[in-house]
Image (cartoon, rainbow, N blue to C red):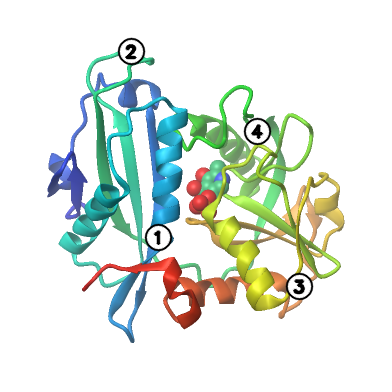
Amino acid sequence: MNNNRLIWLNGNIVPLSEATINVLAPTSQFGANVFEGIRCYWNGEDKQLYAFKLNEHFKRLKNSMKMFRMEDKYTVEELKKGFIDVVTANNYREDIAVRQTVFIDGFGSWMAKGPINMFIAPIAKSRNDFNNNRGIKCCISSWERISDKNLSPKVKVGANYINSRMAQMEAIENGYDSAIFLNNQGKVSEGPGSCLFIVRDGKLITPPVTASILESITRDAIIQLAKNELNVEVDEREIDRTELYICDEVFLCGSAMEITPVVNVDGIQVSNGNQDNITKRVHQTYIEIVAGKRDNYLSWLTPIYV
Ligand SMILES: Cc1ncc(COP(=O)(O)O)c(C=O)c1O
């Protein structure tokens, strides 16, 4: 962890050591905060840091605030300005990840509506190196994914990550790298912090947004680039657990995971080890796009430095 980082907190840019939150605030006590994890990628040739899909992240953040019954305190322009200001203040010239969190401050209970405040915290985080990334082993979690009927996975609220934590910790304890959730219908939903795709007979398949998943920005980007760049058909439909055992490829995707191949599910090998498989093509295209190397996708990016 870099302790010299600067953090945006309630309109001020301060050293990390001064970015403190009241212990009695509902965010500290009950996870009453909504957030986004946003990536920026450094392009050495352009000498530019590109933020990926900022508008989509801010739209989802505002949707989380709405579903969580928070005051609509920040405009998209304010959210974006805070983001750019704090990344610029840190003068990053490398890949980073940024946590942008709107939280319930003050001294209220778990149902307090405010006061609402925000922090924006960037940290250096390099992209996955696909060649060294030999893929991960996952289990199907014994924990069910939260659903829209109890704790909606669409709300990117801190408290939801207790469900993710239970699954991830159980998986690690049992010798796996991560977990895949089934939803309350017994169908595949997502990972603890990522969405999921499988490949069957040359076609990409991913659970629909109603399968107890976060409406992932990476998932959406992959659907578009598969169709437009890779000429690969994408089916958004329910996936059975056993399809994970017999499909040709599985991968997890998200701002943090990027595209991470899953080579084994429940002890059953799923990847056929093909060096030129669809997962690799998706990953290569994705990394080129996010790093600003595809001119026709520059509209997905916000350059940080002017
Ligand atoms: C539970 C969960 N699902 C999916 C994702 C992927 O979402 P995105 O691609 O927008 O980062 C994340 C990452 O934030 C997540 O936490």
Task: Report crowding for label 1: few under 14, some 14 to 19, many 20 or more residues within 10 A (C-alpha).
Answer: many
Q: State the residue position of label 4.
A: 145
| Separation (CA) of disc 1 from disc 2 | 33 Å
Badge 1 amino acid: Arg
Q: Position of residue 154 (x, y in %)?
A: 55, 37
Disc with the residue nearer the chain's start (2 vs 3): 2
Task: Report crowding for label 4: few under 14, some 14 to 19, many 20 or more residues within 10 A (C-alpha).
Answer: many
Badge 4 amino acid: Arg
| Residue drawn at (78%, 51%) of the image | 267
Secondary structure category for the residue under label 2: loop
Q: Position of residue 226 (x, y in %)?
A: 67, 70
Disc with the residue nearer the chain's start (1 vs 3): 1
- What's the mark number on residue 282? none
Disc with the residue nearer the chain's start (4 vs 2): 2
Q: Are marks 2 and 3 in contact (CB under 8 Å)?
A: no
Badge 3 amino acid: Gly
- What's the mark number on residue 109? 2
| Separation (CA) of disc 4 from disc 2 | 26 Å
Disc with the residue nearer the chain's start (1 vs 4): 1
| Separation (CA) of disc 1 from disc 4 | 25 Å
Q: State the residue position of label 3.
A: 273
Using residue 90 as the reference point, say whether residue 58 is left or right of it: right
Viewer-closest of 37 and 11: 11
Query: Within 8 Å of ligand 1, the CB of disc 3?
Result: no
| Residue drawn at (39%, 27%) of the image | 31
Q: Nearer the viewer, mark 1 or mark 3?
A: 1
Q: Position of residue 230 (x, y in %)?
A: 68, 77
Q: Nearer the viewer, mark 4 or mark 3?
A: 4
Badge 2 amino acid: Ser
Task: Report crowding for label 2: few under 14, some 14 to 19, many 20 or more residues within 10 A (C-alpha).
Answer: some
- What's the mark number on residue 39? 1
| Separation (CA) of disc 1 from disc 3 | 29 Å
